[in-house]
Image (cartoon, coloured by chain):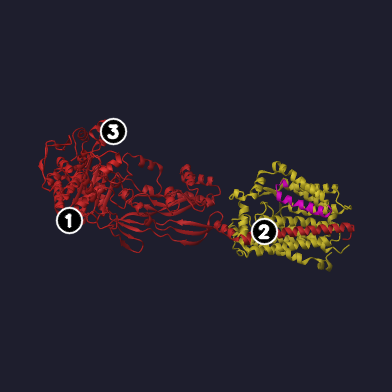
Amino acid sequence: MVTGTADGRRRTSLRLTVFSVVVSVCFGALGVSFWYIQVLNNQTYREMAEANTERRLPLRAPRGILFDRKDRVLVENRDAYTISILREHSENLEQTMQLVAAATGVAESRVRDTVARHMSTPRYQPIVVIEDASLAQVAAVLARRLDRELPGVVVQRVPTRRYPSGGLAAHLLGYVSEISEAQMASGKLASGSMVGQSGIEKAYNKPLMGTDGERRVMVNNVGREITALAELPPVEGHRIRLTIDYDLQQAAEDAFRVSGYSGAAVVLDPRNGEILALASVPSYDPNAFAAGIDPATWKQLTSDRLRPLQNRATQGRYSPGSTFKVVVATAALEEGIITPDFKVTCHGGAIFFNRFFQCHLKSGHGTVDLRHAIEQSCNTYFYTVGNMVGIDKIHKWAEVLGLAGKTGIDLPNEAESIVPSPQWKRARTGERWYSGDTISVAIGQGLVSVTPLALALTYATVANGGHRMTPRMVRAVDDGSGWKTVPPADAGVGPALKPETVAALHDGLYLVVNGNGTGGRARLIGYDVAGKTGTAQVISLQGARQAAGRTDMDLRDHGWFAFFAPRDNPEVAGVVFAEHALHGSYAAPLARHIIETYFASKAGRPLPVLAPPAPVPVKAAAQGVAGQDRPH
Amino acid sequence: MFDRRFYLHLDWPLVAAMYALCVVGVLMIYSTTGDAASAAKARLFLVQIYAILIGTAAFVICLSVDYRSLADRAHVLYAILIGILVYVLVFGVVRGGGRRWIPLPLFNLQLQPSEFVKLALAILLARLFAANQTRLLSTGNLLAGGLLTGVPLLLIMAQPDLGTALTLVPVLLGIAYLAGMRLRVAGVLLALAIVTAPIVWNYGLKDYQKARVVTFLDPWRDPRGKGYQQIQAQITVGAGGLWGQGFRKGTQGQLSFLPVSHNDFIFSVLAEEHGFVGVLGVLGLYLFIVARSLDTARRARDRLGTYLVVGVLSSFTFQVLYNISMSAGLAPVKGLPLPLMSYGGSSLIATLAGFGLILNVRMRRFTN
């Protein structure tokens, strides 16, 4: 420096040194900071950068296809489009929800609710807001997305359950819907999974679901896909061949539809316990659930007085009425208390324990043996025999035949059938067993309450000579490597009945249909149908007076018809339960149609077609209740 | 004017470092925008090359005219630029929320005059303080300097462009410090800043400016909104690692997760694609430039030269440090370009012109 004092020069030099030291320190600090961020924490930031660009899109596996026993498709899959919101990419979630709702015409509150329910899921997981979008909705969203208005919205094609026959066999097949919070808590399934909620769909949910795949893609900052990184294809769920016969199922449901009754029918093969048909009427359309049921339909289904969602065949419990008489007969014969030739004289009723119990025929059946007592459903005979056998042995043989407890069918939420014992009554009501209780039980009234399935199984056991089978729905499973037959859970349990017992029961039941009995409407020439009608009281006579304001129809008794055919070497057994059919004989023609269809299908003949019968006059029904209509 | 002596005394290593950084900048701009969908954006690196050429012309001009004769006309330069700033405020072109630009018909470019104000201010303040013959800087001089800085500062803030306005402050502080500002005065200024901070916070800052400060302290409060740039900048830098992801291979910059990556966040892209090694290289070049310039300040023939170098250099160093800190999420996000590297013609031309002045001082250290 030329000018300035030496002092000034020194100071300038000193300050320049300070300046350079400060700047060097700053650069050093930056270097250390970058070392810290880039080298020491590289892993963390690299993962964050990957999370930015990598998108994992789940590929839903198609559920396994369900076939009937002759490989006809019962449940399949179709392609549906879902519209989802990717929170991660939506800069303004509020606005995205509004735009999606506006573009698709869905109520904004519904979109909002759906998103709110899934707030706890990882941000990268798309939240499905419209499960089965229409093409117009898809087009509306795609058109907007091109404008970059909706970067956080994804349209995906997903396989969705399709039930080609609509409500046919809806209760046994079940339905699928989005996994609930409770189900998520109990399993390892991801939010948004579609899982079986009832029927076969629920019982075999795990093999049916398959394994979801995944698509890893690289996206840019607005969520547009740049390249696909990897794709793990989904694995289709196992295919299942059911024991159900489509024709028979159709026949059972047609029979109800034509007759106008609600109710249930169960048909099985008494030789191996395979369920051939299992119907519950009225039904619902499971397709409505597959793509997310709308609240209105759900409300309608749950508030319907006829309870279409209930599977009456496995979950409804009713008094078996006179169909129960085979249990009493079996107990009496097997315990050696009577022989088939044991006779009782019926005068239209009898007095037990100081109380008069009436027979349905006021004039009396005269003197009848076991075969004819079954044929004519004589109450007096079974009051007498039931009283001789006692409740404990009745309970024991009901269990042996398969009427008490659960049958063990591979369907969810089976109700337990009740054939009371003194212990059961004490545990349940705290009261002791009265001898009079046994008299009511002997004709299938009182505390007896069974599912149609359990009663069908009981008649199958009677039909095959005493081998109680476990009813089953699955014949074979294909896990992708070919069909594998599913072995039965057991080969049938319980002691075989004595041949005399079987012969007497079969004769009596044959006469019900082919003799002078109440089941003539189920007669089929050449097929030796055996069966038994039953009438389940809906309300007691006293109750009828109190039940003011209900329709006549509601007060009418339920009708049962339990059957097997042919009498010798039976190959089909089952029950028809017709709600408010007034009498078991009105259930018999439904069974007849089912049995006829079975044999026509077996022989390859054209299947029978039902003509609607003349409706039962409602007036007569009302009188029937008010008058003396006792179980047959 | 251009004799062999000048050629010999030109600081070639500094010139080399300067152009090296320019080249790195062009490469980084090409990396982030080279295959952009829009043709205009894909040509940005070419625009930057034109700017370098124009800047080189400015550099040569600033080098050629003796800085002392420039200093003699400093008040004229200053007045002209103030006039332009006023003109911009009234007639300027609005872009990106600020009225900062004047169209330049000749090159089809728009110039940001605020970038050039710091040069004029450096020359004017250097002359003012160099004229002071007392041992320590007088309060009167300091006030005059403050006033001369304050006028353009307020005009630029009014555009509004707080970032560029703030780059004027180091010019004043740097020169004043060298000119012997009492440390007591510096202490008083610091105390004053602390005392007035709450007042400025409550009345001086706009809401969005307050939000930036709050966001800086806790960017995860709003990771998709206000904190987005800061978080993404840090991710971009951190993902680079030791060696980087490779040229044009960084996902953050390439897939636009980091906004304005070719501009304010160009250093983040460099850090992502070339890693810590690349960062050290570029930091080294900047430090080298600062060190060489300080050496020039030390060897300057007169106080005017020293002050001029320090004035230009302070602003430059401040911007470099601030931008690089910001690019790693270590400072609040502010629209300040990285000198020599960021895309932007005005900044580049002004920076090159500034180095023309610095080398001007060095080249003439032996002349009379």
* Label 2 packing within 10 angstroms: few (<14), some (14-19), many (20+): some
Number of residues whose C-alpha sits closer than 10 Å to that of mark 3, classed few (under 14), some (14–19) or many (20 or more): few
Give amino acid for label 1: Asn
Q: Which residue is mark 3?
A: A550
Q: Are marks 1 and 3 on the same chain?
A: yes
Residue A335 locus on image (x, y percent): 17, 49
Residue at the (49%, 45%) spot, across then down: A116
Q: Earlier in the sequence, mark 2 or mark 3?
A: 2
Q: Report how far apart the C-alphas of labels 1 and 2 lie in the structure.
A: 90 Å
Which image quarter: residue B242?
A: bottom right
Which quarter shows the C terminus of chain B?
A: bottom right
Disc 2 versus disc 3: distance between alpha carbons? Answer: 83 Å
Is residue A484 on the magenta stretch? no
Q: Earlier in the sequence, mark 1 or mark 2?
A: 2
Q: Share a chain, discs 1 and 2? A: yes
Q: Give the residue pinned by disc 1.
A: A569
Mark 2: secondary structure: helix
Q: Nearer the viewer, residue B77 or B142?
A: B142
Q: Residue at x 75, y 64 (%)?
A: B15
Kind of element beneath mark 3 = loop
Chain that is coloured yellow in the picture = B
Q: Provide the letter of the chain coloured red.
A: A
> Which residue is disc 2 drawn over?
A33
Q: Position of residue B208 (x, y in %)?
A: 65, 45
Relative vertical location of residue A242 with respect to residue A588 in this rendering, above or below: below
Q: Position of residue B289 (x, y in %)?
A: 75, 62
Chain designation of label 1: A
Q: Nearer the viewer, mark 1 or mark 3?
A: 1
Q: Is residue B164 magenta?
A: yes
